[in-house]
Image (cartoon, helix red, strand yellow):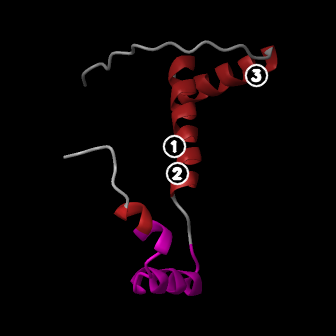
Amino acid sequence: MAATTKDARLNLRLRAADDELIRHAAEQTGQTVTEFLTTSAVERAHEVLADQRTFVLDGATWDQFVALLDAPVRPDPRLVALFATPTRITD
């Protein structure tokens, strides 16, 4: 397995009790503290970002959502006017 180059550094300060807890957990998983913290932080970051990109709908709400997507588009007069206005950008 090829080693990945690590080209960034992250420094942090924490309480002694938290440091001890993290070191113990890393030891229990057979990882270095760096590996443990990186893995844990990256997994949590993915969870946080997924919560902002993914949503779950129940069956009735899903059906309503799909119906709205499938419904014909009603032109918004403000958008029609906006796109009819000449711009300063030319092709």
Query: Which of disc 3 and disc 1 is earlier in sequence?
Result: 3
Residue at x 50%, y 23% (from the top left corner): 35
Residue 79: which disc? Answer: none
Amino acid type at circle 2 is Ala
- Give x and y (percent) for residue 24: 67, 23
* Residue ID for mark 2: 50
Real-space Cα separation, disc 1 to disc 3, in angstroms: 22 Å
| For the residues bearing labels 1 and 2, Cβ distance under 8 angstroms | yes
Residue at x 67%, y 23% (from the top left corner): 22
Between label 2 and label 3, give the one nearer the viewer: 2
- Give x and y (percent) for residue 65: 51, 80
Amino acid type at circle 1 is His
Question: Magenta residues?
Answer: 57-80
Say left or right for 10 vs 76.
Answer: right
**Crowd around label 3: few <14 · some 14–19 · many ≥20 (10 Å):** few
Q: How many marks?
A: 3
Say left or right for 66 vs 23.
Answer: left
In the picture, the quarter occupied by the N terminus is: top left
> Secondary structure under badge 2?
helix
* Residue ID for mark 3: 18
Query: Which of disc 3 and disc 2 is earlier in sequence?
Result: 3
Closest to the observer, 87 or 54? 87
> Secondary structure under badge 3?
helix
**Crowd around label 1: few <14 · some 14–19 · many ≥20 (10 Å):** few
**Crowd around label 2: few <14 · some 14–19 · many ≥20 (10 Å):** few
Residue at x 66%, y 14% (from the top left corner): 12
Question: Image height check: is 62 above or below 29?
Answer: below
Real-space Cα separation, disc 1 to disc 2, in angstroms: 6 Å
* Residue ID for mark 1: 46
